[in-house]
Structure formats: structure tokens, C-alpha cells
Image (cartoon, grey):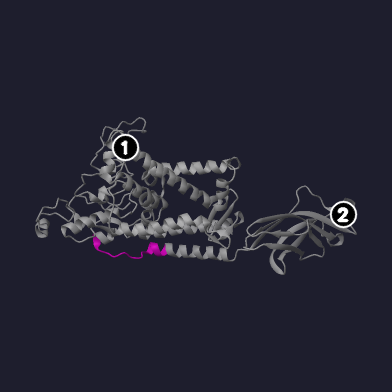
Amino acid sequence: MIDLTPSESIPSTPAPSHESADSLPGPDSTGVDAGPATERTSTREVDWQDFREHLATADKDGNRRWIFPKKPTGRWYQRRTILSWAMLAVMFIGPVVRIQGNPLLMINIVDRRFSILGQIFWPEDAIIFAVAMLTFLGGIMIFTTAFGRLWCGWTCPQTVLMEMVFRKLEYLIEGDAQEQKALAAAPWSPRKVRIKALKHGIFFALSFLIGNTLLSYIIGSDALIRIITDDPHEHLAGLGFMLLFTLVFYAIFARFREQACTFICPYGRFQSALLDENTMVVAYDSKRGESRAPWKRNQSIALRQAEGHGDCVNCHQCVAVCPTGIDIRNGVQMECVNCTACIDACDTVMDKIGRPRGLVRYASLNGIQHGQPLRFTARMKLYSVVLTGLILLFLGLVLTRHAVETLLLRAPGALFQSAGEGRISNLYTLKVINKSNRDLPIRLQLQNVEGQIDIMGGGLTVPRNQLGQSSVLISLPRALLKGSTTPVRIGVYSGTNHLETVKTVFVGPRDDSDTH
């Protein structure tokens, strides 16, 4: 983990971290291992002035300490708001958007059908999914190495919904941070009940909307509409999932909040292995800001610098607006989601005292300590080469994917039969997956032997993006059989278009005495 903490001072307002000295096994203060944790008794008390000794969201008794972040304002917050509204619009209209009749995005695990940008994928496309997952992970690696947790603060659905929807409604209903604190500390009264009931009622309704939107990405909007409009007794499982998703999202946004990022999401811990001194992060310029001291009225910059003080006036506004309760001046921490609220808060203070903006800004450790610009490092280049190779492989697999996937297997338990006129017949089961966006009439043709092949039931037409099944009867002259098994190649056609070739074996008698 990168630490930008100035060694000469520790702020009076602590910020949390995932590291705690009391939780780490090892030797005691004398340097002698005291044995297993169950037998070791720690006599050292927690230093509550050290941000790495405790969590900002927990008090001394281990109870949760509720965070009331101040409402942020500023240019970065405005940019995030614009981007968030665009993303929310895409999220809510996504399930109803169709490309060639297929959903824009659908991950139907139950039916094992996946639609991405209107293209239907099946379990048989597992290699494409594997490459896509590797590409996604490679993209995370190079993106995080270069830009840190930009995803978390700007595009993560958890952050977007929490900060740009639920938090805004909370400010509108309960007021800013001080008013929220006062309301939480106040005894229950009719006014408090009304405010809390209104807020949680809206939160639950929004959670229902979000939960149904997610469900439509899984089962499709058409199936969701049927669950809502049909007799409830016919969709008990679907209604159960609707309620479950609603309760989960309500719990996340009404109660769990920032703890979903700090306790559950693995990305904050994963990023520690990817960040280096050249990664762009939200950082405090300790060289410019230290040492901290309040700003005195009519104080000149020259006098302040002569006294050894930097630009940080220790106003704690960066802490007041932080949605995870940390102090960015302690350096890069796991809880920081790069939401830029501290940048806006600090820039506002710098404007008031007439100092340049950027005391807290997007920068790298080398940029702050050595003035180096952001650069494309050798590690980024290596990641980029790997990522480019994965992208090309993925595109190649998608573009060369067959429109039809055919499986031809001998019918279970069926034996060969004598068809008369010196012919032997075998019964097969035919499964055809139509991955195209049009219905396909299927025709089969023997390619390497002379014989007859018939699709039972008068033929097979497979609807677009569906699975078609039928039985197939193949008859071959006994004279053409090569022992008990004969390799057979079968061409799959739609009209005159050759779609693919499948291979199977034709079973016949070992000799004349075995003929049935």
C-alpha cells in the first residue's frame, strides 16, 4: 500500500484503515512470541490518535459509529453527478432495449442463455466466457495500475446509487450532516417518526425498483412483466426473488452503506497489490501542506512559511465530506474510493484563503514527492500487451463463432435395426442451437457414404436463438459398413447454405449371424 503520511504529524481526527496492530499475530513487545492468540493477553492499549489502530466506523466498544458526511459541492462533484445520471439512465432502460430482437444485456443463469449487446451466448460458448473474464481481469489490472480506484468513485453501481440517489434524497429529507446528527440524537417524536418513515418508505420503493431492474437483467424484461401481470400463484419463485432482491438492496443502501465497500468488496484489498508510486490516486500534498496550523486573520504567506507552517489549515473539511470517514491526509487507504469529495472541500478552503487549489488532488506519489508527471511505466506496457492479446483473442472467437451448434448422438439404449433390402438403420438424437437472429430450416446430408438420412416428424426448423431437437434415422447398405462401427460425416444445411459438419459413428452387425 502506498502511504503518503507525513512522518512529523498525525491529525487529531483519525481515519480508518484495515490494518490493526492488535489483530496481527506475532511477538509481543519484548520480541518473544507469546504463543497462540487464545493464550496471549495484550496489555497495550489502542492508540486512538493513530488511524491505523482502529476503524473510523467503530467506537471503543466495537459498536458501529454512524457516518454523517457533509454534502459535497464543487466541480468534481458536478462532473460525477452528470456521469452518474447518464449511467443511471442506461441502467434503467437497458432491460427494455433490444438489438435485433435480443436484450441489450441478459445473464439468464437459470436457462443458461446470455445476451451481450444483442448476441446470444450458450453454455457451449464457455471458452468465450473464459477469455472474456480474463480480459475483464486484465483490464482491471492495467486500469487500476494507472488510475487507481477511479472505477469505485465514478462508475461503481454501489457508489453511484448510494451517493447520487440515496444520499441526495437523505439530504433533501433530513438535511445536511449537522441536521442528520441532531435528528439521530433526538428522542423519538411524531416529527422524527414522520421524517424517518418518509425516508425509509422512499428507500424501500427505490430498492424495489432497483431489485426488479437487476432481476430483469437476469431473466429478461418479458419474463419480469409476466411475473407482475400473471396470477401470483403461477410465479411464486419469481415473486420470492423480487422480494429478496428488494430486501438486499434496502439493507445495503439504508443500513450497510460504506461497509459494503470496506468489508465485502474485495477490490479495495486487491488494489493494494496493483498500486505503485506512479499510480494516479486522490492524494494529499504533504510537502505543501505540512506542518498544519489554523489560518490566522491577516496572516501573510511569508510569515506563515517562516513559522514552518504549510497550506493545510487543519479545518478537517476533507474528513467531514468523506463518505467512508477517513482522513485523506493520512495517505492512501483501503477505504478511499476516490470519490473526489475531499478535493472539492479542500479547493473551497484554498479559494477562501487565497491559496492555489490542489492541496488535495489527483496525483501520484512520485508526482508529489519528486514532481514527476504521470507516465506509462514498463509494468503498464506489459499489462497492455497482455490485455491487447486477450482482446484480439476474444474478438477472434466471437467473429468466428458458428451460427449453428449441432450435436448428434445415438439414441440411448437403441440398437441397430435391419431395414430390409440389405440395409441397416440407426436412430440418433439431434440437438441444434440456432445462435443467429433468424429461423433456420435444417437439412442433413451424408457426406462420406451413400445412404439415407431422415429427420423424423417431417423436418426441423429451429427458431432464432433457440434450441431445436428431433430424432434422426440413418440407413446404410450393409455392404458399405466397415466392421461393427463405421465413421459417418453429416453436413448440416439451411437451404443451400452449408452450416457445419458433424461426425458420428454408425453401428452395425459384426457378421451375418448377429443381424437383428
Badge 1 marks a residue whose secondary structure is helix
Residue furthest to the bottom = 496
Q: Amino acid at mark 1?
A: Lys
Camera-side residue: 172 or 109? 172
Q: Disc 1 designates what residue? A: 192
Badge 2 marks a residue whose secondary structure is strand
Quadrant in the picture for residue 496: bottom right
Residue 121: % across, % down: 58, 57
Find the magenta span and give its range. 369-382
Quadrant in the picture for residue 274: bottom left
Q: Residue at x 49, y 50 (%)?
A: 213
Residue 178: % across, % down: 25, 43
Q: Residue at x 11, y 56 (%)?
A: 304
- Relative to 27, 493 lies left or right: right
- Relative to 117, 369 lies left or right: left
Let me know if residue 510 appears in the view. Answer: no
Q: Disc 2 designates what residue? A: 418
On screen, residue 50 above or below 108:
above
Q: Residue at x 58, y 60 (%)?
A: 101
Nearest to N terminus: mark 1 or mark 2: 1
Camera-side residue: 235 or 255? 235
Decide: few, some or many residues near mark 2? Use Cα within 10 Å; few <14, some 14-19, many ≥20. Answer: some
Camera-side residue: 135 or 436? 436
Q: Amino acid at mark 2?
A: Ser
Let me know if residue 428 appears in the view. Answer: yes
How far is mark 1 from mark 2, CA to CA? 86 Å
Is 234 included in the stretch rendered in magenta?
no
Q: Residue at x 19, y 49 (%)?
A: 315
